[in-house]
Amino acid sequence: MNINDLRVGLIGGTGEEGRGLALRWSSAGAKVTIGSRSIERAGLAAVEINQILGGSYLLHGTNKEAIESAQMVLLTVPFEHAASTLEAHAGDFARDSILIDITVPVSFDKGRARYIELPEGSASEHLRARLPEHIHLVAAFKTEPAHLLAAHNEALDCDVFVASDSKEAKARVIEAISFIEGARPVDAGRLDSARALERMTVLAIGINRRYKVKAARYRVVGLP
């Protein structure tokens, strides 16, 4: 893969996670389009990131335009809006498109994070059941703190766990992530591994809260 040929689109890319990933992939040389329901919000996010990058690298548009322009699409909306957003845009994906799901079903009770149990077992499996078969779903960036992703002057310095039932789509996402500075992609297996990954996120949120930090994340030791 030539990173300069990679086209990445973001659905709902104006939040911390979306802006952070857009910036990091743009910095690596990918062509990135931030999408949003609001073209104005997408434009403001693109201007902010381009100012950091020192040029007009990042594009923006509607969610539909971001999907249609991309080889890989990141779903960066809050989980409670994920299914309805995908339902509205399912027809915008080309055959064999790759959708990267970073959502985690979590609620907060008096500041404590609680995992929202889903019949399918995880957010990624919940969304997979609602997508056309020709869209390959890959779970990634589940355990990276939004604050860290958005902090462009801080290296990720962590492992990014990647899971999917499509070996080919997973391999392509792993290769794309390897271009992001400080991110080591780790093959986490099939899509049902998202059940563990999403709960690891809730654990990390709790660790951050107890230790009064914002960037606790994971690294696996002992890998070659």
Image (spheres, rainbow, N blue to C red):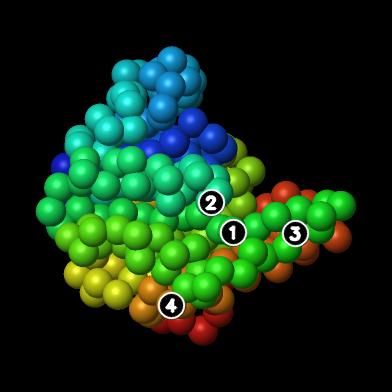
Task: Give above or below for 129 relative to 82.
Answer: below
- Contact (CB < 8 A) between labels 1 and 2? yes
Q: Position of residue 19 (x, y in %)?
A: 48, 35
Q: Does dot 2 land on a helix, a strand or a loop?
A: helix
Distance of label 1 from label 3 (alpha carbons):
10 Å
Q: Nearer the viewer, residue 96 or 4?
A: 96
Camera-side mark, 3 or 2: 2
Q: State if disc 4 and disc 2 touch (CB < 8 Å).
A: no
Task: Name the side, left or right, on which 1 lies relative to 73.
Answer: left
Q: Which residue in the protein does label 1 denote?
A: 105
Q: Which mark is residue 79?
A: 2
Whether the residues at callouts 4 and 3 have beta carbons within 8 Å, the answer is: no
Q: Circle 4 is placed at which residue position?
A: 192
Q: Earlier in the sequence, mark 1 or mark 4?
A: 1
SS at mark 3?
A: strand
Q: Quadrant of residue 33?
A: top left
**The C terminus: image quadrant:** bottom left
Residue 54 drawn above or below residue 121: above
> Looking at the image, is mark 4 or mark 3 earlier in the sequence?
3
Residue sitting at 47 percent across and 73 percent down?
120
C-alpha separation, residue under disc 1 versus residue under disc 2: 6 Å
Within 10 angstroms of label 4, few (less than 14), some, or many (20 or more) residues? some
Instruction: Tell me the quarter of the picture where residue 217 sits.
Output: bottom right
